[in-house]
């Protein structure tokens, strides 16, 4: 009888472990990405770049802190790509995360449209990323109306690449690297805020393809959309290469292990 109870207990633990290992992480990435997309798009309705940057960063820090031990708290297909290449996420897990995050971005963007009046939603195109500095859009806030920055699409891609590299490296160094022995999700949020503050009024500050794609699908705003894939993908490749080759801990670094 005792053996039967023990076997039943072991079976229950195995079921729980399977749920925690395979199902919870998928739900965590879906829920976190959907919530982050909603908050990131709604933040554009606020007044002032500082508020927009703080909303983005605080949302990511809070969500990453809450889900870091479940899924890794990535909520960004490009971060998942960087983490896979850097050895922080299993490739199969990453292949599951990426489409889940993209679908979650669609859901989060749909909620933005659902809660706002049509005129309000259309005024800022649902928070879809856009090139702002060269007046390719109709300004909807006071800063946009009085400031004009001239730059090319190539410059926008370079800006997005550099900003994405900063953000993704902050995730890898604080949540994938093992030398400190602890994870610090808040630094991921700091990187997000810094990236938004530095690039929002120029290239649009869109470092998350799930948010960009979801907002574009729901709002129908597609101009220069490729910028918001090129920047994150190249940024993910650069940050993962820097981590793997130069900056990573001994377990993950490929060079100079001796």
Image (cartoon, grey):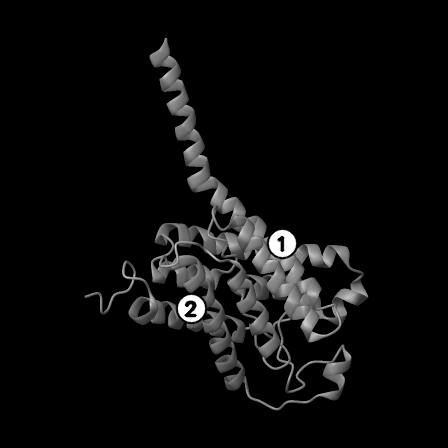
Q: Residues within 10 Å of mark 1 (few under 14, many from 20)?
A: many
Q: Nearer the viewer, residue 181 or 122?
A: 181
- The vertical placement of 192 against 151, above or below, is above
Q: Which structural element holds mark 1? A: helix
- The vertical placement of 38 against 192, above or below, is above
Which quadrant of the rendered structure holds the N terminus?
top left
Q: Is residue 108 left or right of residue 72?
A: right
Q: Gap between marks 2 and 1, in whole Å?
A: 22 Å
Measured as percent of width and height from the top left, residue 148 is found at: 68, 89
Residue drawn at x 75%, y 88% as measured from the top left = 146
Judged from this view, the residue extending furthest toward the top is 1
Q: Which structural element holds mark 2? A: helix
Is residue 220 shown to the viewer in this render? no
Q: Quadrant of residue 216?
A: bottom right
Q: Which residue is mark 2?
A: 236
Which quadrant of the rendered structure holds the C terminus?
bottom left
Residue drawn at x 67%, y 56% as measured from the top left = 110
Measured as percent of width and height from the top left, residue 129 is found at: 62, 72
Measured as percent of width and height from the top left, residue 107 is found at: 62, 53
Q: Residues within 10 Å of mark 2 (few under 14, many from 20)?
A: many
Judged from this view, the residue extending furthest toward the left is 258
Q: Quadrant of residue 256?
A: bottom left
Q: Which mark is residue 35?
A: 1
Residue drawn at x 64%, y 85% as measured from the top left = 133
Q: Is residue 134 left or right of residue 209?
A: right
- The vertical placement of 256 against 21, above or below, is below
Q: Nearer the viewer, residue 24 or 218?
A: 24
Measured as percent of width and height from the top left, residue 131 is found at: 62, 80
Residue drawn at x 80%, y 61% as measured from the top left = 117
Give the mark, 2 or 1, whose residue is nearer the N terminus. 1
- The vertical placement of 53 against 152, above or below, is above
């Amino acid at each position: 009888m005792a053996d039967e109870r023990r076997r039943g207990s072991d079976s229950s633990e195995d079921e729980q472990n399977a749920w925690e290992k395979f199902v919870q992480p998928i739900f965590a990435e879906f829920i976190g990405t959907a919530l982050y997309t909603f908050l990131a798009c709604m933040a554009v309705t606020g007044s002032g770049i500082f508020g927009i940057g703080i909303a983005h960063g605080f949302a990511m820090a809070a969500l990453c802190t809450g889900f870091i031990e479940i899924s890794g708290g990535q909520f960004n297909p490009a971060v998942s790509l960087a983490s896979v290449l850097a050895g922080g996420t299993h490739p199969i897990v990453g292949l599951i995360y990426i489409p889940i995050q993209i679908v979650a971005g669609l859901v989060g963007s749909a909620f933005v449209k659902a809660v706002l009046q049509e005129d309000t939603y259309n005024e800022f195109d649902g928070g879809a990323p856009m090139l702002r500095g060269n007046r390719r859009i109709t300004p909807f806030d006071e800063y946009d109306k009085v400031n004009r920055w001239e730059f090319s699409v190539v410059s926008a891609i370079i800006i997005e690449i550099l900003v994405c590299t900063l953000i993704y490296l902050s995730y890898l160094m604080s949540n994938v690297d093992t030398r400190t022995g602890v994870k610090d999700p808040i630094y991921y949020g700091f990187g997000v805020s810094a990236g938004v503050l530095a690039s929002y009024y120029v290239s649009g500050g869109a470092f998350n393809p799930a948010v960009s794609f979801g907002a574009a699908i729901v709002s129908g705003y597609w101009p220069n959309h490729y910028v918001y894939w090129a920047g994150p993908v190249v940024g993910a490749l650069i940050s993962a290469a820097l981590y793997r080759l130069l900056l990573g801990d001994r377990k993950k670094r490929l060079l100079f292990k001796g």
